[in-house]
């Protein structure tokens, strides 16, 4: 009898625990729904007409935030893959040049042309390797973490910290970048382009384009012969080419097609950035200045870029040319010199011969 009573009591206690657990879960679910309701109500009240600071751009940014998050994370993870791809493709081209093109140059060209090809080719290769390594390993520069005496022209809504002039927040790096130009579009740098590595990025694009053009022009005759030989592979009877000869033909065609394609694509990007440098702008500032120019035009005013010192002086500031010999030591030779300024303030560089124009002009 007592054993039955004990069993009955144990079953009742277990049933009560289940009921209490069910109540807790039910209360937790109700609490979560209530929190979501309050959050949605707060978001609704933050939209117009309740909030005068909200506009169409803020609403679109909020709607596209999941898309931005996906693109940023995919770019971040695939950056290493693209860097490895760039290194492997460039290494394959260099190997083909040394194995296929260079022996023919040494056998058929005059001594003067041989010296020119050896000097120019190796100089171009050294400049490509140096600037690519510096572009992917040099930090673009970030504002200091400690506020202190840091003067900012605005406040970053992501970092909730002052932003110096020309500083922008990179969503991929998840921090503000000094004089940010862009987070490399093709992700083949896996790094943000900013104040301290902008020159390395542009120099790499320039010398890589020059190298691809050089290989395309130098290998044009061999490309035509190799392409004509490949077309005869499917004739009847087939030609008696050895495996080494077939590999040579395909390697030359691969080199010419790849170098020509990169020269066109990267050459267009290089010209675009050259135009921006000539105007004293970055990729981001171009869009900002365009909107500001249109806004002031409606008011009868003219916008003047305060960082535009003139075409020639813009290039001197960008390349770090202070004296004439720097065109050789800092432009034509590998140089790790720092850019003008700290990226926190923008005083007039010593190489500028003219005073900057005012920001606004009536």
Image: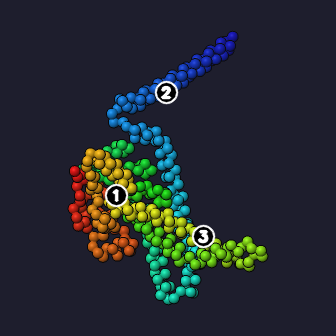
Question: What residue is rendered at 71% in x and 78% in y?
Answer: 242
Check disc 1 and report the residue beneath it.
281
- Nearer the observer, disc 2 or disc 3? 3
Sooner in the amino-acid sequence: mark 3 or mark 1: 3
Query: What distance separates the C-alpha of mark 1 from that of mark 2?
Result: 49 Å
In the rendered image, the residue lying farthest to the top is: 1
Question: What residue is rendered at 40% in x and 38% in y?
Answer: 56
Question: Relative to 228, does residue 272 appear above or below in the rendering?
Answer: above
Judging depth in this view, the residue of 166 and 162 nearest the camera is 166
Q: Secondary structure at mark 3?
A: helix
Place of residue 41 in the rendered image (x, y in percent of width and height, measured from the top left): 42, 27
Asked if labels 3 and 2 touch by Cβ distance under 8 angstroms, the answer is: no
Asked if labels 1 and 3 touch by Cβ distance under 8 angstroms, the answer is: no
Badge 3 crowding class, 10 Å Cα cut-off, few under 14, some 14 to 19, many 20 or more, is: some
Query: What distance separates the C-alpha of mark 3 from that of mark 1?
Result: 37 Å
- The numbered disc on residue 32 is 2
């Amino acid at each position: 009898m007592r054993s039955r009573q004990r069993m009955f009591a144990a079953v009742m206690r277990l049933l009560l625990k289940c009921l209490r657990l069910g109540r807790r879960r039910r209360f937790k679910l109700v609490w979560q729904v209530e929190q979501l309701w309050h959050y949605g109500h707060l978001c609704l009240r933050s939209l117009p007409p309740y909030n005068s600071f909200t506009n169409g751009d803020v609403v679109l940014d909020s709607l596209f935030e999941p898309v931005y998050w996906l693109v940023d994370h995919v770019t971040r993870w695939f950056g290493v893959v693209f860097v490895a791809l760039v290194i492997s493709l460039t290494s394959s081209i260099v190997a083909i040049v040394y194995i296929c093109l260079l022996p023919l140059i040494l056998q058929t060209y005059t001594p003067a042309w041989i010296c020119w090809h050896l000097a120019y080719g190796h100089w171009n290769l050294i400049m490509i390797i140096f600037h690519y390594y510096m572009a992917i390993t040099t930090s673009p520069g970030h504002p200091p973490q400690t506020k202190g005496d840091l003067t900012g022209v605005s406040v970053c809504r992501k970092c909730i910290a002052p932003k110096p002039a020309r500083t922008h927040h990179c969503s991929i790096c998840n921090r503000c970048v000094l004089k940010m130009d862009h987070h490399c579009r093709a992700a083949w740098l896996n790094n943000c382009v900013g104040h301290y590595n902008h020159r390395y990025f542009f120099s790499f694009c320039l010398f890589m384009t020059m190298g691809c053009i050089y290989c395309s022009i130098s290998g044009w005759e061999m490309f035509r012969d190799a392409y004509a030989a490949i077309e005869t592979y499917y004739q009847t009877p087939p030609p008696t080419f050895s495996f080494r000869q077939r590999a040579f033909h395909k390697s030359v065609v691969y080199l010419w097609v790849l170098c020509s394609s990169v020269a066109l694509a990267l050459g267009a990007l290089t010209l675009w950035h050259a135009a921006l440098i000539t105007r004293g702008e970055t990729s981001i500032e171009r869009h900002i200045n365009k909107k500001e120019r249109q806004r002031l035009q409606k008011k009868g005013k003219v916008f003047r870029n305060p960082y535009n010192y003139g075409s020639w002086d813009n290039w001197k500031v960008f390349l770090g040319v202070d004296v004439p010999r720097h065109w050789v030591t800092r432009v034509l030779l590998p140089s790790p010199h720092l850019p003008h300024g700290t990226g926190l303030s923008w005083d007039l560089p010593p190489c500028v011969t003219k005073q900057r124009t005012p920001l606004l002009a009536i």
